[in-house]
Amino acid sequence: MEIIEVSDRTPELMEQLLIIWENSVKETHLFLSEAEIADIRKCVPQALAGVPHLIVAKDDANEPVAFMGIDNRRLEMLFVSPQMRGQGVGKKLVHYGIKEYAVNEVTVNEQNPQATGFYEHIGFRVYRKTDMDEQGKPYPLLYMKLYMDSETAGKKRKKAVTAVFIIAAVVVVGVAAAVFFLISHFAEKNVVTDIREYEKYFGPQGIHQSKNTDAWEKTRESYLVLNYIFPEKLPESADVEAFYYEYYNPWDPCYLCYMVYSCDEEDYKAETERLRQISMPKDYLIYGSTGFPYPLLAVDSSSYGYIYAMTDEDQNKIIYVELTFCNYFTDIHYERVIPKEHLPIGFDAKSGNPYREEYLSQLK
């Protein structure tokens, strides 16, 4: 099996991929009629030609058996020949996309539950749902983001299983001693406040960036939501007022990243323009938030929390915040670090927040 990015999209290859697409859709998209498939088929060649990264999996005979398309970290398409389904080809392609192209988003049809389960197994989670597809047709869509890949999740499961045996020791060694040992042994924490370390965490090869998998192995730190709002490098004129980075993982990872700086007019204009180019979700007010105290430049929000940037225009100041976490609450005391005036208005991500309580009630 060979996985390559296509550099020459020949008519012959496009025809082969079109056949894979059609056979795969007929096998998996059972909610579509023959007429609908034929209608969509007309648009596929244009999509194949236009997607920025087209990656193909070839068998030992050098024949394409699956392909995917990637655009700006989003998996736009993934199709596998029916005869290759269940052999791990799709999973290999997605992991390749995560490692080489920092893929962290995908959209699937709700009426294709096999696809939803496939991506959830890899580590994607649904953060938004629409009643219609992007063409306005009555096909509900599920928007998914990568929480952690299945390899990282496997390590966490192993940690959790080990923890079960430690909990059993409570009966023998006493509650207080066992709990202290459990937390101190398994909780992972890293706090950085030295701005000189910024690029170590947020640079192109930073620990907090998706592509640096070697750094994950060394630090055991992973990510929840890929952070492309924080800059990879600070501008030359940056006068940093505050910087704080915390990774805390008692059972599941939590992040708090906070930075405030002012800069000269030229650097301020360049950075605010970059941030305004980042697409924002339509419904970004979550966890009780009713708004932001400063003009918003960029925001990414989901059940995993917030990443956003605001500006104090009078002072050429930019405020960056990341609060990401699992299970609808954070274990980090964020109010001790981030001033109230830099948090979303009404934001509550503590353990008893209404958003989490509503989620727990749905599980009963």
Image (cartoon, rainbow, N blue to C red):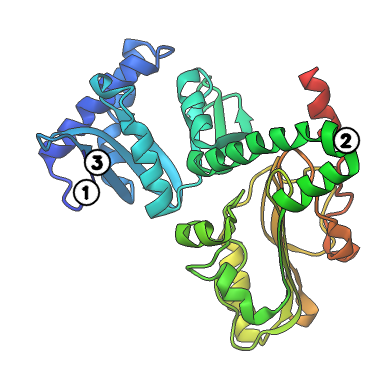
Rendered image: mark on residue 6: 1
Residue located beneath label 2 in the image: 354
Q: CA distance from mark 3 to mark 2?
A: 45 Å
Q: Is residue 318 visible?
A: no
Query: In which image quadrant can residue 62 be found?
Result: top left
Badge 3 or badge 2: first in the primary sequence: 3
**The disc labelled 3 sits on which kind of residue?**
Val
**Judging from the image, what secondary structure is the residue with disc 2 in?**
helix
Q: Mark 3: few, some, or many residues within 10 Å (few <14, many ≥20)?
A: many
Q: Earlier in the sequence, mark 1 or mark 3?
A: 1
Residue 3 at x, y = what percent? 25, 44
Residue in front for this viewpoint, 213 or 15? 213
Q: How many marks?
A: 3
Location of mark 3 (residue): 56
Q: Which amino acid, mark 1?
A: Val
Q: Position of residue 123 (x, y in %)?
A: 53, 37
Sequence-first disc among 1 and 2? 1
Between the residue at mark 1 and the residue at mark 2, the CA separation in whole angstroms equals 48 Å
Q: Is residue 300 left or right of residue 87?
A: right
The reply to whether discs 1 and 3 touch (Cβ–Cβ < 8 Å) is yes
Q: Is residue 134 above or below residue 56?
A: above
Q: Secondary structure at mark 3?
A: strand
